[in-house]
Amino acid sequence: MTATLRVMLDQLIAPTDPDLQMASSELTRGLIAGTPEGCEVEGVAPGPAGRTVDIPGLAGVRRAPLARRELAAAVQLGLSTGIGGGMIHSPTLFAPLVKHDRVHAHEQTVVTVWDLGPWESPGELPKSALGWHRAMLKRAVKYADAVVVPTHSVAERLAEHARLGERIRVIAGAAPSGFSVPRDEIGRRRAMDLPEGFILLAGRAASADALSRGFAAIGASGIDVPVVVIGAGEGEEPAIADVAAAAGIPERSLHVRGSLAPEDRAAVFGGAVAFLAASERSALPWRVLEALALGVPVVAASSPVHDEVIVDGGMLVDGSAEGLAAGLAEALGSTTAAQRLAVLAADRGRAFSWRESADRVWQLHAEL
């Protein structure tokens, strides 16, 4: 008899976050590539219509009778979804978390939490999204067989918000498979009207505190290079420019861009002299993983997550503006220092892969 692992693919039908969309796609591809003998992978997606799911190797895609919005409300309230049972894995909290029989019917439900923002930075989310995440975690406490998180430090923090006990499991994410600086990187940066040789940051206006410390650090470091910010929300450029100006970054030096496709993002990393990670939030730092994968020197605020993800692959410093400034000055103080950090970053970047993450997911379900 074939054992079917059913993966929730709502992020591929109606994505709410580019990183979650990437994680859902990459993990599913990894699960297919590492499918054990006697098993198969099936997709579960909102329906009844919508964009198609094009992932080779799927045994099929089961469409729920509800569209994405209605399905999100149904799983939040524990109502019937038409998805059915079986062995379900969700790369997010989006899953039918209801009573099921793991022992006799071999039913399992595993969900994933990448970011504790809804519990630790609630002001960054709309009330509807905040309520949905909190309700889904409560349902996970009652019904999930396991909750996957990306780092041990996030696991410790999640345990403070939810009584999950030994059901919390750590499985890291990674940069997109094949993530590399494209051959036409210079042309791509020119098309985005970006300079060469800049310090790169990532963030939105909601993360103004981290951006402010990053901008202040650049100003205090004495390094006179352009500053590029990626990942800004639509229309947030003026607000981020105000934060930069308050920290002493002149308007002529600042370049703010929004959410970019992976190829464009890799091209931006290719023009950076360093990536500055000032955030200390309990979430997988996707852009840090990408910087490591491309061998870009990383200077990061020391935090439980950064310490665990970066280890010796970058420069971990005090998260104050002064600490970050000193780190930047040291990292970019000489060509030798920058090259050494680049080598360390690339070495650390090889520690993360979606195939390994997928293998651990298969192992988790086998243990359950």
Image (cartoon, helix red, strand yellow):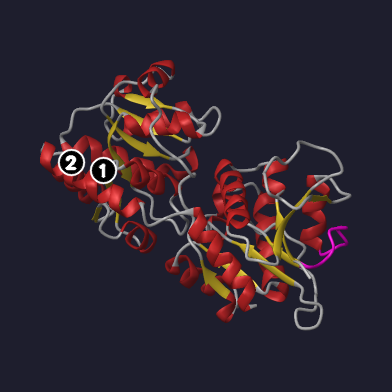
- Please state which of residues 124 and 290 is positioned toward the viewer in this rendering: 290
**Which residue in the protein does label 1 denote?**
297
99, above or below 78, in the image: below
* Image quarter hosting the C terminus: bottom right
Residue found at x 63% / y 56%: 92
Q: Nearer the viewer, residue 291 or 162?
A: 291
31 relative position to 281: left or right: right
State if disc 2 and disc 1 touch (CB < 8 Å). yes
Determine which quarter of the picture holds residue 302. Answer: bottom left
* x then y, percent, for residue 11: 67, 46
Q: Is residue 255 visible?
A: yes
Residue density around tag 2, few if under 14, some if 14–19, many if 20 or more, within 10 Å:
many
Question: Residue 270 lies in what quarter of the image?
Answer: top left
Q: Is residue 124 magenta?
A: no
Magenta region = 78-86
**Residue 111, above or below 173:** below
**x and y percentages locating residue 310 in the rendered image:** 32, 56
The question of residue 79 being in magenta is answered with yes
Amino acid type at mark 1 = Pro
Q: Residue 164: give x, y in percent of width and height.
A: 60, 77
Q: Residue at x 85, y 63 (%)?
A: 84
Q: Which mark is residue 338?
A: 2
Considering depth in this image, is 284 or 210 the residue closer to the camera?
284
The amino acid marked with disc number 2 is: Ala
Q: Earlier in the sequence, mark 1 or mark 2?
A: 1
**Residue 116: x %, y % from top left:** 53, 59
- Front residue of 127/314: it is 314
Magenta stretch, main secondary structure class: loop
| The residue positioned farthest toward the bottom in the image shown | 103
Mark 2 lies on a secondary structure that is helix
